[in-house]
Image: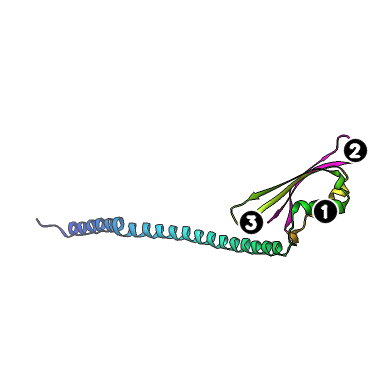
């Protein structure tokens, strides 16, 4: 069977188109798909690396804070207790007679330190007395903080407050 020049040309072009289709479908297409998959994987790994870097910085910051707290705790006088400290501060602030109760407790954490907490209720105190007392007890350089405070107006005596607060430190 003899083909005319034009038919040969059409057949060659058709074969080339089919070959190009198969080349694109089975060689070029998978290459680009794999490249896109790898680029996506690289972006995911870069995001993970960035998160690891941020976590490392946070860890270093927390570790520095931990060392600072350990130094503060080591610098305390021997036999320091939060309960005694709060009682002495109340006496200095002139509100010792306004303490209704003081409840000490210790919370063990997962690390080597334990939280020492004292919950106390103050009755019939003025705002100035409360502020003065808080100023005396919240001492970052001694690692003592007020964890929670609830203040309400005394219903019987106008101008006076009732406060329940939790002071916390580490031991």
> Mark 2, mark 1: which one is toward the viewer?
1
Q: Answer yes or no: do the residues labelled 3 and 1 have beta carbons within 8 Å? A: no
Residue projecting furthest to the left: 1
Q: Which residue is mark 3?
A: 113
Q: Mainly helix, strand or loop, the magenta region?
A: strand
Near-viewer residue (49 or 22): 49
Q: Which residue is mark 2?
A: 158
Label 2, label 1: how many angstroms apart (C-alpha)?
A: 28 Å
Coloring applied to the structure: rainbow
Label 3 sits on a secondary structure element that is: loop
Give residue 104's position: percent from left, percent from top: 72, 47
Lateral position of residue 145 relative to residue 135, left or right: left
Q: Answer yes or no: do the residues labelled 3 and 2 have beta carbons within 8 Å? A: no
Question: Image quadrant of residue 58?
Answer: bottom right
Looking at the rendered structure, the number of numbered marks drawn on it comes to 3
Question: Image quadrant of residue 92?
Answer: bottom right
Let me know if residue 31 is in the magenta part: no
Residue at horizontal 61 percent and vertical 52 percent from the top: 109
Let me know if residue 159 is in the magenta part: yes
Earlier residue among tags 3 and 1: 1
Label 3, label 1: how many angstroms apart (C-alpha)?
A: 24 Å
Residue at horizontal 19 percent and vertical 58 percent from the top: 6
Characterize the local packing of mark 3: few (<14), some (14-19) or many (20 or more) Cα atoms within 10 angstroms. Answer: some
Residue at horizontal 70 percent and vertical 64 percent from the top: 74
As drawn, the label of residue 88 is 1
Label 1 sits on a secondary structure element that is: helix
Give residue 68's position: percent from left, percent from top: 68, 64
Q: Quadrant of the C terminus?
A: bottom right
Label 2 sits on a secondary structure element that is: loop
What's drawn in magenta, residue-wise? Answer: 143-171
Near-viewer residue (86 or 167): 86
């Amino acid at each position: 069977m003899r083909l005319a020049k034009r038919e040969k040309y059409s057949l060659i072009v058709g074969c080339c188109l089919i070959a190009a289709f198969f080349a694109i479908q089975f060689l070029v297409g998978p290459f680009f798909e794999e490249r896109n998959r790898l680029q996506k994987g690289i972006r995911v790994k870069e995001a993970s690396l960035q998160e690891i870097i941020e976590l490392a910085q946070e860890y270093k910051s927390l570790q520095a804070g931990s060392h600072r707290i350990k130094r503060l705790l080591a610098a305390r006088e021997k036999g320091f207790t939060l309960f005694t400290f709060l009682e002495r501060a109340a006496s200095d602030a002139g509100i010792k007679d306004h303490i209704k109760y003081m409840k000490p407790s210790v919370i063990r954490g997962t690390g080597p330190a334990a939280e020492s907490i004292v919950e106390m209720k103050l009755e019939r105190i003025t705002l100035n007395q409360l502020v003065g007392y808080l100023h005396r007890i919240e001492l970052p350089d001694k690692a003592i903080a007020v964890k929670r405070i609830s203040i309400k107006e005394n219903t019987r005596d106008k101008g006076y407050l009732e406060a329940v607060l939790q002071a916390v430190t580490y031991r």
